[in-house]
Amino acid sequence: MQGTVIKSTGSACLVRLDNGKRLSCTVRGNFRIKGIQSTNPVAVGDIVTISKQKDDSAQVDEIAERTNYIIRKATKLSKRSHIIAANMDRVFLMVTLTNPKTHLLFIDRFLVTAEAYHIPAEILINKTDLCDSPALQDDLNTIIKIYEHAGYPCHSISVFNNKDVARAAALFKGKVSLVAGNSGVGKSSLINAMDPRFDIKTASISKKHQSGKHTTTFAEMYELANGGFIIDTPGLKSFATYDLEKEDLSHRFPEMRNLIGQCKFDNCQHISEPKCAVIQAVETGQIPTSRYENYLNIYQGDELERFSN
C-alpha cells in the first residue's frame, strides 16, 4: 500500500492512503542507519510504502525519492539536520511586524533554503490590523518592496479581522503548501479561518517577551475543502541554514543571481572584490542593504540560536 505521511512524531506517523483512508504506522528502525542524518527520517509529505504486520499493525517500509524538502540545522547536538516537510508545490513564510516581530535575517535564511531546493516561496504578512502607526506602515511597505523586488509575492492579511483570508485561501487551492514562521505569527489561526472544520489549538502572545508559544508540536498536513493540502508547522524561534555551499550562496538570492557574470572575477563571492557587480548594486540601491548584510551573515556562518527584538 502507498500513501502520504500527514503527521510524523519520529517513531510513528499517520499516513493518508491513496483511497483517502488514514492509517497509523510505526517507522522501521533501520531507516535510522541508512545514512539519513536527520532527527526525523520520515517527514510530513513523504510518499511511503507500508505493510500490514501479523498483529494487524502497520509499518513504513520504503520512502519514495523526494522531489524537494525544507531542511534546517537541528537543535539536537546528536543529529545534523531536521526535515520540516517534503514534496511541496510551494512554501509560504508567515511574518508579522509586531506581536511578535519577524526579523529580516530569519526571513532571508528561510528563503535561501527554499531557493536551494527549488521550491517557490511567497510571504504572508499577518496582523496588519496592528500596523496602525506610521512607523509600522513604513515597515510594512518596506518589506513588500524588498521581497517583491526579489521576486517573492507578498500578501497582507489580518486573520483577526478576517481581512483577505478568502483571498489567501485561494492561494492554497489544488496545491500542497507549507506554512512556516515564528511562534505566534498565526499559522494555525489562518488554517482555522480558511476551513471552519478545523479547530487547531492556538495560544496568546506573551506580553513580556512579545513571542508566541508552541501550540503546534509536530508538523501536520490538513486537507482543505477547496482541494488543497496545507502543512502546518511548529513555530520556529530560529532558522539555521543547513548544508549550503558558500560558493553557491549568492545564487540563492535572486537579485544577486541576476548579476552573475557581470563581476570582474568569475569566482567573485561579492565580499570585497574589485569591480563586483553585486557590491555596486548595493551601493546604488538596486539591492537592499538588508539583503546584502544578511547574505554576509549567512556566508560567514554567524548562526543565531534565537532572534531577539
Image: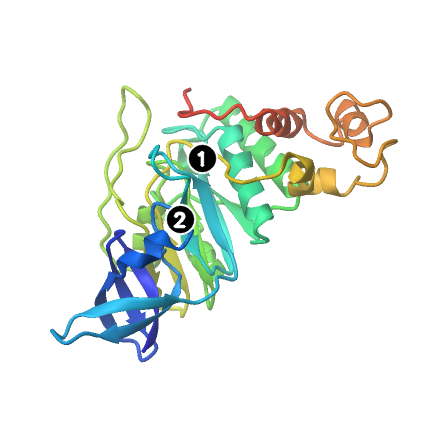
> Which residue extends farthest left?
55
Mark 1 or 2 closer to N-term? 2
Residue pictured at 85% horizontal, 22% vertical: 274
Percent position of residue 167, x then y: 47, 56
Q: Nearer the viewer, residue 18 or 30?
A: 30
Query: Can see residue 197?
Result: no
Percent position of residue 83, x then y: 41, 48
Identify the secondary structure beneath mark 1. loop
Q: Is residue 213 above or below residue 187?
A: above
Q: Is residue 218 above or below residue 308?
A: below
Give the mark count. Answer: 2
Q: Amino acid at mark 2?
A: Ile
Q: Amino acid at mark 1?
A: Phe
Residue pictured at 43% horizontal, 58% vertical: 169
Query: Would residue 265 appear left or right of 26 to someone viewing this image?
Result: right
The span from disc 1 to disc 2 (Cα, nearest Å) is 11 Å
Residue 42: name its quadrant.
Answer: bottom left
Q: Is residue 248 above or below residue 223?
A: above
Residue 59: name its quadrant.
Answer: bottom left
Q: Neighbour class for label 2 at 10 Å: few (<14), some, many (≥20)?
A: many
Percent position of residue 159, x then y: 36, 45
Image quadrant holding the N terminus, namely: bottom left
Kindly identify which residue carries mark 2.
84
Q: Nearer the viewer, residue 187 or 75?
A: 75
Residue 185: name its quadrant.
Answer: top left
Query: Can see residue 133?
Result: yes
Query: Would residue 114 appear left or right of 172 to someone viewing this image?
Result: right
Identify the secondary structure beneath mark 2. strand
Q: Nearer the viewer, residue 135 or 81?
A: 81
Residue pictured at 42% horizontal, 45% vertical: 180
Percent position of residue 190, x then y: 35, 50
Name the disc covering residue 239, or none. 1
